[in-house]
Amino acid sequence: MSDRAWTGDDRRHNDECHERWVRLRNRRTDQSGYRDEWFDEQCGGCQFWVALRGGLGRDWGVCTHPGSPFDGRVRFEHDGCDLFVVRKDGSFG
């Protein structure tokens, strides 16, 4: 056992997580009924989205909106919900 904390930067592990988690998306851009405005209301641009560290943080973060059904859950940066709040600085991801 190592004395160092595991950073999560294992490519195979991260790829497996990505594949498993992406199935839990709330909104898919290829689904019928995907509204045009949702392209601008993706989790990665929400002020309540906090990116994970390491390799997974490039695409994944945690929702911290207390009213969202996704509060405390890992979310894909291109997913979204009805409680989106744009970041004041306009950044994404």
Image (tube, rainbow, N blue to C red):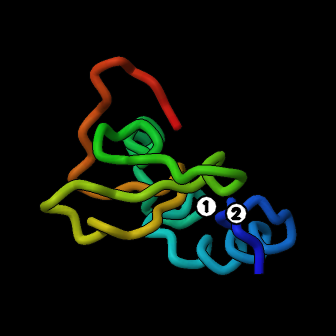
| Percent coordinates x, y for residue 63 in the rendering | 34, 57
Label number found at residue 4: 2
Residue furthest top as drawn: 89
Residue 21 lies, with reference to residue 27, above or below; the image says below
Type of the residue with mark 2: Arg
Q: Is residue 62 above or below residue 93?
A: below
- State which quarter of the image contains the N terminus: bottom right
Residue depicted at x 38% and y 70%: 73
Measured in 3D between alpha carbons, the distance from the residue under mark 1 to the one under mark 2, in whole angstroms, is 42 Å
**Looking at this rendering, what residue extends furthest in the front direction?**
3
Of circles 1 and 2, which is in front? Answer: 2
Residue at (49% x, 47% y) in the render: 51
Residue 45 horizontal/vertical position (percent):
42, 36
What is the quadrant of residue 10 in the picture? bottom right
Q: Name the residue nearer the viewer: 91 or 51.
A: 51
Residue type, mark 1 in image: Asp
What SS does tag 1 mark? Answer: loop
Q: Which residue is mark 1?
A: 30
